[in-house]
Every structure is written in structure tokens, then in C-alpha cells.
Image (cartoon, rainbow, N blue to C red):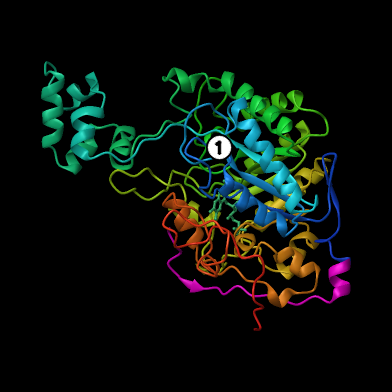
Amino acid sequence: MWKPPQKIRWPSGLGEIPTPDEVAKSLLFSPLNVGRLNLHARSWIPAMVPWRASNDGEVIPEVLDWYGRFAQGKPAAIVIEATGIRDVPSGPLLRIGNDSFLPGMKKLVEHVKRESGGKTKLFIQLIDFLAMKRRPPRDKYLGQFLRITPDHQQSLEMPQATEDDIRDRLLSLDDEQLEKVLTPREWQSMVNGHRDMVTDTHLPHIETLPQELPKLFSEAAVRAEQAGFDGVELHYAHAYTMASFLSATNTREDGYGGSKENRVRLPLEVFREVRSATSDDFVVGTRFLANEVIDGGSSLADACYFGTEFARAGMDFISLSRGGKFDDAKQPKLGSPAYPYTGRSGYECMPHHLSDELGPFGRNFEETKTIRETVRVAGFETPFVAAGGIHNFQIAEDVLQSGVAEIVGAARQSLADPDWFEKIRLGNMKDIRQCEFTNYCEGLDQAHKQVTCKLWDRVDLDEPGILKSFDKKRRLAAPRSYPSLTD
Ligand SMILES: Cc1cc2nc3c(=O)[nH]c(=O)nc-3n(C[C@H](O)[C@H](O)[C@H](O)COP(=O)(O)O)c2cc1C
């Protein structure tokens, strides 16, 4: 992952320890309505892909084990990882693209409800993503994959040449010459691996996304409701299809790109279709980006506008994330696909403890607050979820008291210690195992390995009945109780 050149070390800490009275009166432990649903507190575990599903995208015991462990800590809400809405294979990423996934999803809901004693509300993040290829060997790309066009004949000044001659010529060029002959897009496909983009409207399956996605999302949401989820989070953030529609880099000319009004059109159409296909009690919210953190990305004013339009349309919550784009991702290794969390925008999404003067904790708060304030001024009370480096009571309560958001989302801290909210509530703050923000978990995600935390994955490996990683070297869920930090 890219890191700020300053490499200033930022240790996490417990912050100020509240008195029992302060905890009891805190906003963190006060209830809140999200849509028609009541959350018992403001504690929220945002989506985290753990690479646990079966190769067919099914819920298996490892998935239950992962979410069950978070549920034991009784957060007010858990958002199940980004789950594919299409009926197409995508490896061990959860899917909900047809009714055969329903029994597994039902089990997941029942398990979380049971493990949390009915305390935790359960949402599922619905995602659409476009096809992408692994980085090809140069000779394979130029010799086979590249579609030869008259433009290549022209720029090589070989008007009568056959396709084979053109390929031979391209293969003989050095990189500097080649970059002048290929289009920027072809060059990118060679050096990073091809990926479909929402602007590829010459491709029929991309052109028709606005016609197809509302139905795909709404059918998935209906399944989620049938499975017993309390709601869905429409994934409009990071490197995926819906975020690409919102992005200022979306130059589609069919009324779904260009101006901010056009860019928000499909996300609103998807929402309306989901809303009308599900019952009024079912929560429908979204996660989108306060800041894309890429050159030419949407402005803060754009994000304020999107937030206001989502609130106006009737979204039940708005969760804000940051960065996580393909646009500035590092070049993948040969044979690997690009990973959207390797560039600066990736850093902003999951900031590491080696940081700049701003540090890794709360980098998204200021913009979240501005977007929330804009939405409030427009007259909407939609609850906001803030995330990014939240790891102690003081930070969490500050977020809530200072008007950044109504809900605190803590992903990596909850992975480090799934009981941390409960330990605060019970006055056992010193027992909290604190995330060190070294991004060990993110490294596993990047390698498509089962995600665990380095603070506990080698602890008590001989504990009977625990599930382990494929190589048996790591446990897959945090031990039930931690030794006290003061032990
Ligand atoms: C292993 C891992 C997987 C993640 N998967 C998702 C995901 O599926 N959807 C999503 O919106 N964010 C995902 N995120 C981002 C987190 O939800 C969160 O926004 C980010 O980690 C910053 O919050 P934190 O500092 O509390 O960890 C993931 C993060 C990690 C570490």
C-alpha cells in the first residue's frame, strides 16, 4: 500500500477513560432510529470482506464463525461484506444473485441474531462490479489480446499490413515507442490488466447498465429481506460500478454521465427500485465517498449534492467512506489483478499507522461533517455513519458530539477486538485489545487470503473446535475472551 512519505508513526491509544456515569450518559450508548428500525446504540461494524465464502459465493461455517464472533460483542449494527448481486461466479466473495443463496443467508441472519442475543441489527452491502482481467504478459497482450484496428495501421504507417504483421511490429517496439502507438486505454490494459469501465459505452453490456442495474439491485434486496436482514447498504463507494457512475471521471453521454445531476441519476434510480420492491420497515441506505482522492475526481460540493439528493429520495442512512479507487492503484504483478487499495486513494480508505501530520485517525471526519451539515440545511435528518480510524471511546464520542455523524463505524478496531464496544459499556476499557493500524488484515485481503488480525490469529491454536485457515497456521476468529492488557 502507498504510504505518506513523512512516515510519522501514530500509535493508537485508549484515550481518556470515561467514568461509568459518562458512559451511561454518552451518545455512543444511546439509541437511535434508522428508518423504522431502532438501534440500541451508535456502534456499527462497516462492511469488511473476509474471504470466507465458498468458491460459489455461499455462506459456509467459516462465514457464520466470522460474523458470529462480531455479533457476540453486541454492536448495534453489522454490515455484511460487499455481496455480489449478479448471478455470475466471483470466487469466495459472498453472493446473493439468485434464490439458491437464500438458505445460507437465512442461516447467517439467524446466527447473528442468536449470538448477539437479538441486540445486533443486520444489514448486507450490495455490490456490483465490472469485469477485470489479470495483468497479462506483454507478448501475450500484443500477440493475442489486443484488438488490432486501422488506427494501429495508421500510427505504424503500415496501411496495407496484415494483423500478424502489425502484431510483429508492435512486439518489436520498446515501451517508449509502444506507448505512442497504443491508445492510453490499450496501454493501461497491457500494463495493469484490462478492466471494463462505465464509460465503455461501445460495449453493449456497459451501455445497458442503467437499464439492468435497478432490477439486479432490487431483486437482491428482496432476497435480503426474505432472508431476514434488517436492511441493505447500497455500495456506491470505492472502485465499483455505482461509485464509477457518481465519479467526476464518468463522461458517459447517454444522460448518465457528465454533470453531477446526470451522474447521480442511476444511483437514485437504483435506490427507488429497491425502495419500492421492499417493505417500508426494511432499511435502505448507502455508502458513498466523501472524497475520491484521485485526480479529476468528484469535488466536495459534488459529494454534498449527492448526499442531499440521497436524503431527499428517502435513504434511511448515509455512510461515508473515502478513496479506494483503481485510478491510482499500483501496477499489479504479472498474472495478478489490480487492487484498488494500493495507491494514495487506497491509503485514504484504510489509513495505516505510518502517516503524515494529519495521522490515520479521522481523515474523513471534516468532509463527512460538511456533507452532513449540507444535508441538514436542506432539511433532512438522515443519520450519517462516519468511519476511518475510530478506535477508542474518546474518538467515538467526539464524532457524535461534534456533529460529524450520528453513528460510529469501526472496522479494523472491531476486527482487533470484537468485544470493544461492550468492554467500554461494561467499564472494562483497559481490557480492550487495540488495533495497531498496521494493515495486516488489508494485506491478507489484497492477497485474497482469509482475513484475520495479527493480534489474535496465533493465540490458543489448540483450542478445541476452532476453525483455522487453509494452512492451519491461523485461527479464523478472535478468542472468546482476551487476557486483560494489564495482565
Ligand atoms: C479487510 C477489509 C475489507 C474491507 N471490505 C470492505 C467492503 O466489503 N466494503 C466496504 O465498503 N468497505 C470495506 N472495507 C473498508 C472498511 O469498511 C472501512 O471503511 C475502512 O477499513 C476504514 O475504517 P476503519 O479505520 O474503522 O478500519 C474493508 C476494510 C478492510 C480492512
Q: Residue at x 63, y 28 (%)?
A: 217
201 relative to 431 in the view: left or right:
left
From the top left corner, tell me how far across and down residue 431 is, in percent.
69, 75
- Is residue 19 highlighted in magenta? yes
Q: Which residue in the protein does label 1 denote? A: 58
Q: Residue furthest front?
A: 464
475, 448: nearer the viewer = 475
State the residue in front, 363 or 476: 476
The answer to whether residue 111 is seen in the rendering is: yes
> Left or right: 421 with respect to 291?
right
| Residue that appears at 67% across and 40% down | 107
| Residue 108 in the figure: left or right of residue 32 | left
**Can you tell which quarter of the image residue 306 is in?**
top right
For mark 1, give the secondary structure.
loop
In the rendered image, the quadrant that contains the C terminus is: bottom right
Which range of residues does the magenta coloring cover? 1-24
Residue placed furthest toward the bottom:
487
Crowding at label 1, few (<14), some or many (≥20) Cα neighbours within 10 Å?
many
Q: Is residue 393 above or below residue 157?
A: below
Quarter of the image for residue 227 reads: top right
In the image, residue 122 sits, relative to residue 312, either above or below, namely below
- The N terminus, quarter of image: bottom left
Q: Residue at x 65, y 37 (%)?
A: 105
Tell me the chief SS of the magenta region.
loop
Of 426 and 6, nearer the camera is: 426
423 lies left or right of 480: right
Q: Horizontal and vertical percent for residue 16?
A: 74, 77
